[in-house]
Image (spheres, helix red, strand yellow):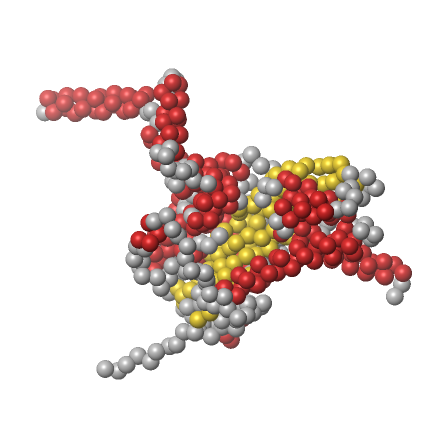
Amino acid sequence: MTIEQSNGNSAAAETVLRQHWISVLAKANGRALELAYGDLAEPPSHERLRGPETGMVMVRGRAGGSGDPFNLGEMTVTRCTVRLADGQVGHGYVAGRDKRHAELAALFDALLQDPARRPSLTRSLIEPLLATQAAILAERARKAAATKVEFFTMVRGES
Amino acid sequence: MYVAVKGGERAILNSHKLLDEERRGDPRVPTLGLNQIEQQLGRAVDRVMTEGALYDRHLAALAIKQAQGDLVEAIFLLRAYRTTLPRFGYGVAIDTAAMAIRRRISATFKDLPGGQVLGATFDYTHRLLDFSLAGEHDSPPAAAVGPAPLDAAMPRVVDLLNLEGLIEEERPDPAKDRVSDLTREPLGFPAPRDMRLQNLARGDEGFLLGLGYSTQRGYGRNHPFAGEIRVGEVAVAFVPEELGFAIEIGEVTLTECQMINQFKGSKSHPPQFTRGYGLAFGHSERKTMAMALVDRALRGQELGEDGEAPAQDAEFVLYHSDNVEASGFVQHLKLPHYVDFQSELVMVRAMRAAQGEAAADD
């Protein structure tokens, strides 16, 4: 493997990591991010480069679930871009109209890109948020599982 | 021709005040919280989001409150609001096969990998009024919790059980490079399927239900089966320009209906089961079933069927499905048409006079 390829791979791995925390931050409850922000030992100063601003993203489905895409309808989305004092830029895109949620998501996205901060933030923020989201999903899936049904086909009588 | 009128400002202002007072109702009754509407009138919220074509539970609840529960009016309010928001872009097409399932049933396949999951449904209820809900206390027993969650993988039934290729497959056309968007362009005919599906998704549930029903009663019959209905949460991903890769921005609750329809074949298509598709925001089962029936009916021409029935007539269906447009045009009849009517009066009088003269001449 050449050095270039190895760099390419690590950039790809970095993107996968970042996609993961961005997803967790977007799906989190805005209040949970506010609490986590309050818990930061040294709350970083940041400036807003864009937003927070609310707009829409068009949700697309596919004909038959797997065919050509079509436009189903829009959803409200709020986005924000921030820059930390050290120059690190973070982006937040969250469903809905909670501007603080978008700003905090952007802030944590910036912080998580800092290799020095990442391990502790992953442990203290991303992993617990993910665990909460997984628990909610599992609870819902267990309630649904309790409604699993076996239908029996009855043989129709001759008489 | 409609000629505008002036005046009536005070009456209109007072009418709006009266409207507000009537909306609020008896002030001794606590005001409705949006969270109450969101939580306890969820199906109304789902319908308003679907036909308002904007997924935002809180805004839909506000629209329902403001419209005093008139859902078509609420849909209008939501459509009007969306015009004030910028569009960030188009999402990545969602994958309903990856849905976190709340409900998933098939009327065609009894034994499904992952199972038939009833979820929360009005089906099998007795439709008897429950007077226990009339009181202040409304604390139902907790829902049963299964020992294990559902299987993580709940593939779409129609993909999984495409027995011997007897059900037509839905595959993207690699040559197709654009997706119609009715929020940016008017309806055009012949309307491609993506345009039709967007129109039907936003279309009035009652209108589509009646049309879907008409196909079952013989007006464009196509022998439908509910191949699968699923309800649950799906992640929405978006590619921001500044990032250049897809990120998940949240989840939406969706209902999907896969209708499977008997088809005797044509010159270009072998005998097989064809498909109709329904997709809507929230838990909107009746809507997606009606949409799937009408989607299939509108495919008649491409499948070589004689398209004589109303549900098979794309112009008839698509031009009349939107309840914001329909409601606006029907209800504009209430606005003063005095000049219009005056000219008609003059004309009818002239016709009568002419008829009288003709009679006198005989």
Residue B187 in the image: above or below residue B138: above
Q: Quadrant of the C terminus of chain A?
A: bottom left
- Residue B79 appears at what percent x and percent y? 49, 39
Q: Residue at x 82, y 59 (%)?
A: A10
Q: Residue at x 61, y 39 (%)?
A: A54
Left or right relative to B352: residue B31: right
Q: Work out whether residue A66 can be spotted.
A: no
Left or right relative to A80: residue B19: left
Counting every numbered tag in the picture gives 0
Residue B119 in the image: above or below residue B321: below
- Residue B172 appears at what percent x and percent y? 58, 59
- Residue B15 appears at what percent x and percent y? 36, 25
Nearest the eye: B200 or B84: B84
Left or right relative to B332: residue B273: right
Nearest the eye: B168 or A51: A51
Q: Residue at x 41, y 68 (%)?
A: B107
Q: Residue at x 53, y 61 (%)?
A: A140
Residue reaching furthest to the front:
B137
Residue B200 in the image: above or below residue B225: above
Nearest the eye: B159 or A148: A148
Residue reaching furthest to the bottom:
A158
- Residue B111 appears at what percent x and percent y? 47, 75
Q: Work out whether residue B134 can be spotted.
A: yes
